[in-house]
Amino acid sequence: MSAVYSMTGFATVNGPGFTLTAKSVNHRFLDLQVRVPSGSDGLEAGLRGIVRANVRRGHVELTLQVDSAVGSVVTVKRNDELLAALVGAFREAAGVHDLEGEPDLNVLLRIPGVISTEVVRTAVQVGALELGAAAEALMLKFNDARGAEGAALAAEMRAGMGRLLGMVEEMSALRAGVRQGHIARLRGRLLELMEGVDVAGERVLAEAAMLAERSDVEEEIVRMRTHATRFQAILDEGGEVGKALDFLLQEMNREANTMVSKVNGAMGERGLQLTAIGLAMKGEIEKVKEQVQNLE
């Protein structure tokens, strides 16, 4: 049995001088966006291949961030022409004023323009092997996160299918008495209309059978039971299940609509109960459909 994956996930890993991050949300197909720093375009193809080997559906964003602090070089430059001019000016002034002493170098170096600094950030070279290993590790973490969420969704959907199957059995039990109810109500109605004139039993049975046939949901119950059981089996198989489950839910919703339409013609309390069950089925199917939209 394979894991069931959610299309929503997040993971990050650190490498030598870089950070690799993956995040995803729902999408009908695999929509992959890879962001790498300028000058690292050659690494993009390898990253795309690794993601495609591990993800089937979803809008996935993979981002490579390079540590800008690594590779920084500080260069100190001295303006010797300005420094020589300052020393010359100091000595000339000392001679003019008949003073003794030499200029203080510490003071001269603090004069604006004598010393300048420059920080050069060299591009960090991310190795393809190191990046590939980090990307594989990232996908493991990413799929672990998606698998955990997928398992939780699968558990909720199995519970939903269990409730739906319970409603199917409840409707199956109730439909058994619909024909008898039609016969009793139809006989009473015909007697009332015909003012006590005896009504042929065959006619009552024929009319009742026709009404019961219109409101009978046996075929829909069988198909709904089959679909729900198949839904659970697909979940157990795991893998890329989202599209298959979505198709099954469309079929189940169609059966539920037919059930509600048919049982609306049923008479009495049973008819109301059958209608309520049919509407509850539709509500349960809709809940599961929302959850299926998150599956790969």
Image: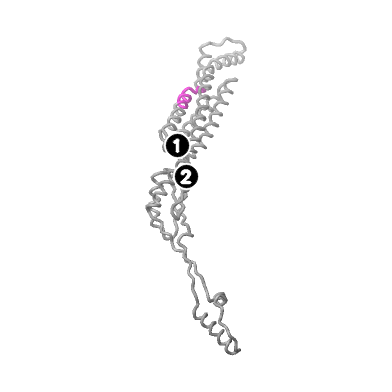
**Residue at the (53%, 21%) spot, across then down:** 170
Quarter holding the C terminus? top left
Considering every residue shown, the one lying at the far top of the view is: 198
Judge by depth and name the residue closer to the eye, 82 or 272. Answer: 82
**Residue at the (41%, 56%) spot, across then down:** 126
Q: Which of marks 1 and 2 is in front?
A: 1
User: Residue type at mark 2?
Assistant: His
Image vertical order of residue 242 relative to residue 199, above or below: below
* Magenta part, dominant SS: helix
Q: Is residue 221 magenta?
A: yes
Q: What stretch is highlighted in magenta?
A: 214-225
Instruction: Tell me where residue 190 appears, x and y as whole percent.
Output: 58, 15
- Give the secondary structure at mark 1: loop
Instruction: Tell me where residue 287 appears, x and y as whole percent.
Output: 54, 34
Question: Does residue 109 appear to the left or right of 18 in the view shown?
Answer: right
Query: What mark, if any, has residue 27 been given in the picture?
Result: 2
Query: What mark, if any, has residue 4 been given in the picture?
Result: 1
Query: Real-space Cα distance between discs 1 and 2?
Result: 16 Å
> Is disc 2 surrounded by few (<14), some (14 to 19) or many (20+) residues within 10 Å?
some
**Residue at the (49%, 69%) spot, across then down:** 118
Quarter holding the N terminus? top left
